[in-house]
Amino acid sequence: MRYPADHKTRVRERIVQAASQRFRRSGTADVAIADLMRDLRLTHGGFYRHFRGKQDLFDAAFLAACEESHRRLTAAAAAAPTGRALEAIIGAYLSPEHCDNAEHGCPIAALSSEIARHPRRTRVTLDRAVRQSAAAVAPFMPGETPAEREQTAMVLFAGMSGVLTLARAIADPALRRSILEAARTFYLGLAGVRTASTRSGSRRAASKGE
Amino acid sequence: MRYPADHKTRVRERIVQAASQRFRRSGTADVAIADLMRDLRLTHGGFYRHFRGKQDLFDAAFLAACEESHRRLTAAAAAAPTGRALEAIIGAYLSPEHCDNAEHGCPIAALSSEIARHPRRTRVTLDRAVRQSAAAVAPFMPGETPAEREQTAMVLFAGMSGVLTLARAIADPALRRSILEAARTFYLGLAGVRTASTRSGSRRAASKGE
DNA sequence: TGTACATCAGTGAACGCGCGTTCACTGATGTAC
DNA sequence: TGTACATCAGTGAACGCGCGTTCACTGATGTAC
């Protein structure tokens, strides 16, 4: 072989990583394999040595994005001071940075409405990701049984991803910021955190939360 | 003219209606103009007598879907018994029927992640729709000032649309149902409604979850 | 140790297809005179 | 009232482009003998 033993694996990994960002930024249809490969200093023909086709790449890229996202999630929770993991998770997810950088963020928020149109195989990956993330966050959630906490975690994630997706689609930057902020306040209230805006008058988000 | 005076308007309306459903069902990229026109017993050439191009059609279709969705929303609120408007809105939005019929449902949930990639013009329509729906629901929301209630309404909608979008993408029907139900319970709780699952200590929803 | 052959990541031309858009044309009706 | 011309929704062939996929080929290295 003219390449080191792990060469193929590494090239594949580079393709998956690049694709995973592109798909999140531009959506499935707007990612062209030839473009992708060219940016990696490769040609499109070689693509098929690594993947059976575009869908196969999407699956791998989506899975990689889910894993990356999950790692970031658990890292944020682990880095937070004791008892403030949920706060850290919510703050990171609904941050302007996350909103502005879909290509490095949650693949569910970035691709939400498209995923329903992908084949079952892809959606099974989603199922796993949802269960996994819910399980990871469940311990920090309000609720009496573990199952209840997990369900609330799923609702939290689904809700936050909806907020992020909507915020990204909004044309007016002021409205976008306002939605993001309102959602932060709302969900942090859920988590039992008093933010500046809850302190300054609105008690209901926190008390209404449960 | 060989057609009645309002003929053109009516044909355009039919195209917009059909497109609005198709876009919600299949996404922007998977709707082909020739297919659409054929199903309406027309040919694709005539399309350009009504629209400047596909994007122009999408804009009209998206606007129509937003209006339809808003009408349904206010109708549900108006039809509900006094004091239960919010409950009715949430129940309808998170219903299995809505989940199963994207083509007749909320265009934000159906197209969420795609809209961010549409031109500004389209996204301004979204802004208007979001403000309008939030304003319509605000009166039923908890909160002290109108602005506060409107923001909470936006968070509610964004959250529910995220739930719906995610539920539609989930492969496992049991997980899908469980997310939808958990979200119903959660948001109805917000609205101050005790559902069967909250009353019965969420034993039912919880046991179903797994 | 040398020779012939197999392997395989990568190349780039070519193929095929779908689809958005254009365009010359049709034919029924309205309008000018 | 009749004639010539304009209008315009709709038709369907054709165009052009992007893009996913295929395929014959390259060339470096490994392997068999």
Image (tube, coloured by chain):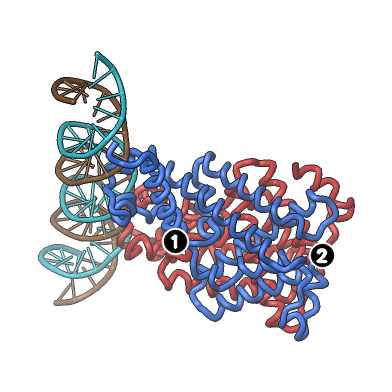
Chain colours: A blue, B red, C brown, D cyan
x then y, percent, for residue B138: 70, 75
Image quadrant holding the C terminus of chain B, namely top right
Q: Residues within 10 Å of mark 2 (few under 14, many from 20)?
A: some
Image quadrant holding the N terminus of chain B, namely bottom left
**Residue D25 versus residue A192 in the image, above or below:** above
Q: Which three-letter amino acid code belongs to the residue tagged 2?
A: Glu
Give the residue drawn at x 62%, y 45%: A128
Q: Quadrant of residue B209?
A: top right
x then y, percent, for residue B169: 58, 48
Q: Which three-letter amino acid code belongs to the residue tagged 1?
A: Arg
Give the residue drawn at x 40%, y 58%: B11
User: Which numbered circle lies on residue B98?
Assistant: none
**Residue C9 versus residue B91 in the image, above or below:** above
Identify the residue at the far right of this view: B200
Q: Tag 1 or tag 2, which sits nearer the N-term?
A: 1
Say which element carries label 1.
helix
**Mark 2 and mark 1: span between their CA atoms?**
35 Å
Residue at numbered disc 1: A25
**Residue B2 versus residue C19 in the image, above or below:** below
Q: Is residue A136 left or right of residue A50?
A: right
x then y, percent, for residue A90: 66, 67
Give the residue drawn at x 68%, y 65%: B75
Q: Residues within 10 Å of mark 1 (few under 14, many from 20)?
A: many
Q: Chain of mark 2?
A: A
User: Which numbered circle lies on residue A210?
Assistant: 2
x then y, percent, for residue B155: 66, 69
- Asked whether the residues under the numbered discs 2 and 1 touch, taking CB atoms below 8 Å apart as contact, a structural biologist would say no
**Residue B55 versus residue C25 in the image, above or below:** below
> In front here: B117 or B149?
B117
Identify the residue at the far bottom of this view: A200
